[in-house]
Amino acid sequence: MKAYQSDDIRNVAIIAHGGAGKTTLAEAMLFTAKATDRLGSVDQGTSVLDFEPEEIKRNITISSAFHHFDWQGKHINIIDTPGYANFIMDTRACMRVAGGALLIVSAISGVKVQTETVWKYAEDFELPKLVFISKLDRERANFFRAIDEMEKTFKCNPAVLQLPIGIEDSFSGVVDLIKLKAYRYASDQSGKFETIPIPPEMEDDVAAEREKMIERIVEADDDLIEKYLGGEEITEEDIYAALHEGTQTGKFIPVVCGSALKNIGITQLLDLLPICLPSPVERGEVKGFDPKTKEEIIRKATADEPFSGLVFKTVSDPFTGQLSIFRVYSGVLPSDSSCLNANKDKKERIGQLLKMEGSKQKPIEKCIPGDIVAVAKLKETTTWDTLCDEKAPIIYEGLEIPEPIISFSLQPKSKGDEEKLTTALQKLGAEDPTIRINRDPQTKELVISGMGQVHVEVTVDKLKRKFGVDVEMKEPKVPYKETIRGTVKVQGKYKKQSGGRGQYGDTWLEIAPLPRGGGFEFVDNIVGGVVPRQYIPAVEKGILEAMEGGVIAGYPVVDIKVTLYDGSYHSVDSSEMAFKIAASMGFKKGVKDAKPVLLEPIMEMEITVPNDYMGDIIGDLNSRRGKVNGVEPMANSQLIKAHVPMAEVLKYAPDLRSMTGGRGMFTMKFSHYEEVPAHLAEKIIAEAEAAREEN
């Protein structure tokens, strides 16, 4: 591998909605740059970047993949990111460390909801963007419609740098509006092309579009505006300099075009990448903080600063073990050295540093500022940990992990696999932080939660393939709770005499409701020693144990206040056990008389849907007993905020996909508990009683 400097690096995240052709474009770039010796195909399962069996099976990118190549003296790291909502957090994580974004807009489907999502991520991270209009060789392709949609949706200023020669079946090349040259490509996917005169029928369009391009590009430089308005000639060098400046500041978005599948326009795209997108040095200094004092620390992307890097992805590799992929922000780290994990305050031994090449890795001697590299088998390090020089500790902020939106309970098909399942899930959780694993304390189920049904299914597929654990997925039980609406006073008395020492405990309890979310409160109001001090903890324990099993349907009792205000004891027969049983009996009896009700978890949802579907989605939410709290307009879509019972949205992800043709997405998190309507409560109670009798 040739030596390169930080100035030469470009870290490019390829982003778009699912199915736009990100991986196909990345494969064409690698092939054209001679980083691979064949043009990988997603459809044929020969992609260098979509190499996981789950990706090949579904023909989609599930996990970001990394590769690199040299072009015109620049070292370009490309990140092929997922576009489907289930895996979009992986995309966001990679954009956190990228230097620029190559956004694909399909000439057929244009801007979709997921395109808006990744655009917003790019804006959040202030990433300069270059747009590639793809699929111009396909039926119904429309170059200018795609640009118009992009301009309206993102409220941006596209600077069109190329025009397509032909469209659909006749698409054969591109006209470069900067160089005023036309390139016609071979039809064999080789990427070979010849320079030809601009087709006569395009000359007027080329002249008009070039004028528009220059008008837009000169806005990046005041001196250039003066030169342009003064009637002086704007040279190629002027345009390229302004193009670089304007892309960095976001004054305009450069737009190029082609066909990744037919390998048309890729060379011209590669030529523009280093011009439009910045080096790590140009991206400027980065901010972190001191682990101990929390004071801000500034680091520059130079070799003479102390080493620091952020782990933004963890991958389980079958041969090398766990790979930690990190972006170097400052300093130099050689292979076979050591550094500090600042988050864990633990020293890590660094073995062989690696450059990722799809499913493979290439050993390197050292990493420099701005580069993206990997290292295997770190003992303490997880995603979003900072690695740094032991003498100059720093921590960089990671990303918040969003709440999962769908859950399933997992049951191993083989009984002996339970322990194996837990270990395997922990390893998959380290690789994918958006997967959550927990044992529900109420239902006792092992619950896996993820960003969508496909996300969970992929994880289950990996469980079988990587760890040999076969599981059954079931809809999880809803964690209902019980509470009361009334206040009662009740006696709980336990008396047992059957030869020898007897048992005696007598309690008088007042049971009253607490506000929702109030939990449990125990009050000791005993005066005069009618219940001795040593037995009062046993009374509370008896009540707590009775609360766990509920009274009307076996669900835990919450939001309740119990006051022990009277009782009696026997000097010989009383014991802690007797008072515990007496309190439990009194509590169960009292709750039945205190207007018991069932509570259900309510989820807070935010649903983003295209404008056309808003009425249908709101109608559907109403049918699910949801309460719509507000609607916020977004570009080409609406954000609906609602509260909906968990029981009604356990399978909302596939339902929303079906209702919106895959164009809707949502987030969901627990909000609060509310009373279950009486007619539904009766059904739930009856089912609980039937289950108890069966057991």
Image: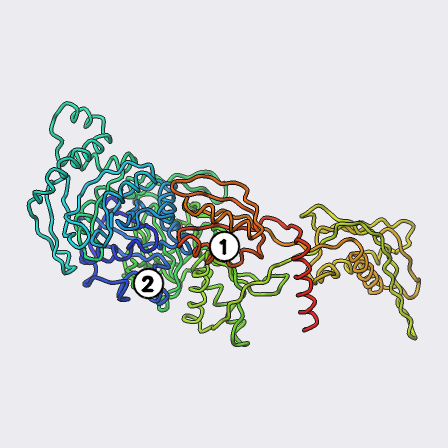
Q: CA distance from mark 2 to mark 1?
A: 24 Å
Label 1 sits on residue: 404
Residue 77 in percent (x, y) is at: 27, 52
Badge nearest the viewer, 2 or 1: 2
Foreground residue among 546 and 532: 546
Classify 362 as above or below 309.
below
Instruction: Answer with the quarter of the image where residue 504 lies.
Output: bottom right
Classify 691 as above or below 453.
below
Label 2 sits on residue: 59
Residue 80 visible in image = yes
Foreground residue among 234 and 642: 642
CB-based contact (under 8 Å), mark 2 and mark 1: no
Amino acid marked by disc 1: Pro
Which quadrant is home to the N terminus?
Answer: bottom left
Foreground residue among 326 and 420: 420
Residue 397 in percent (x, y) is at: 44, 45
Circle 1 residues within 10 Å: few <14, some 14–19, many ≥20: some
Circle 2 residues within 10 Å: few <14, some 14–19, many ≥20: some
- The kind of secondary structure element at disc 1 is loop
Whichever of callouts 2 and 1 sits on the residue coming sooner in the sequence is 2
Question: For this view, does 283 lie left or right of residue 590?
Answer: left
Question: How many numbered marks are there?
Answer: 2
Residue drawn at x 73%, y 61% is 552
Foreground residue among 564 and 528: 564
Question: For this view, does 30 lie left or right of residue 542?
Answer: left
Classify 393 as above or below 409.
above
Residue 537 visible in image = no
- The kind of secondary structure element at disc 2 is loop
Residue drawn at x 16%, y 36% is 210
Q: Which colour style is shown?
A: rainbow
Which quadrant is home to the C terminus?
Answer: bottom right
